[in-house]
Amino acid sequence: MPLIRSATPADIPAMLQIEQAANSHPWSEGTFSTCFSERYFNAVLMDDNDEVIGFYIGEKVVMEASLFNIGLLPEAQGKGYGQQLLQHFIAQAQDLGSLDCWLEVRQSNANAIKLYEKCGFIQTGLRPSYYPTATGREDAILMALPLG
């Protein structure tokens, strides 16, 4: 049964590998490295062989938590692990005293949007032409989950 634990900088290579396998425009190693200061709360999902198969990057500022990134190896997708990671993020945000959770998602990422809605997130806005694509740019959907 997969286990979620706090991520450390030593997990960056595995997180980067997942990011590169799962995204057309992945984060860089440098971006991951900047997400390990005290305002961040990050986690990895470990399989039965203690291999990292998923992760999330969360940030808490004042009373809000933001989900900056969440990812799973392609072969681990569609098995409920994304929901497990998202619920862990929400629980951690609550434990840290957050009143709201925020995220943004590519408009074309129907599976992620469905997952976020299933966990209670609602669309709150749109950032036009936010994400790069192979042929130009696409909008980001802003979503929020009130915790209070």
Image: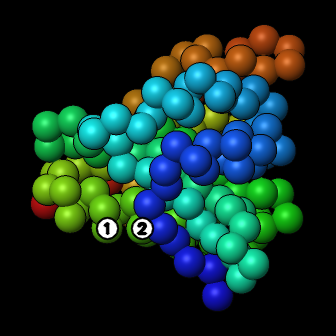
User: As shown in the figure, which amino acid type bears the numbered disc 1?
Assistant: Ala
Residue furthest front as drawn: 10
Q: Residue at x 56, y 33 (%)?
A: 32
Decide if residue 86 is in sight here.
no
Taking 124 as reference, is 133 above or below it?
Answer: above
Q: Residue at x 21, y 36 (%)?
A: 61
Residue 47 figure quarter: bottom right
Residue 74 figure quarter: bottom right
> Crowding near pointer 1: few (<14 within 10 Å), some, many (20+)?
some
Taking 97 as reference, is 29 above or below it?
Answer: above
Taking 19 as reference, is 25 above or below it?
Answer: above
Q: Quadrant of the N terminus?
A: bottom right
Is 117 or 45 nearer to us in this picture? 45
Judge left or right: residue 143 versus residue 28: left
Q: How many marks?
A: 2
Q: Secondary structure at mark 2?
A: helix
Is 121 or 69 nearer to us in this picture? 69
Is 6 or 108 nearer to us in this picture? 6
Q: Residue at x 70, y 57 (%)?
A: 72
Q: Residue at x 65, y 28 (%)?
A: 29
User: As shown in the figure, which amino acid type bears the numbered disc 2?
Assistant: His
Q: CA distance from mark 1 to mark 2?
A: 5 Å
Judge left or right: residue 103 versus residue 110: left
Q: Are marks 1 and 2 in contact (CB under 8 Å)?
A: yes
Q: Which residue is mark 2?
A: 88
Decide if residue 78 is in sight here.
yes
Q: Which residue is mark 1?
A: 91
Residue 2 figure quarter: bottom right
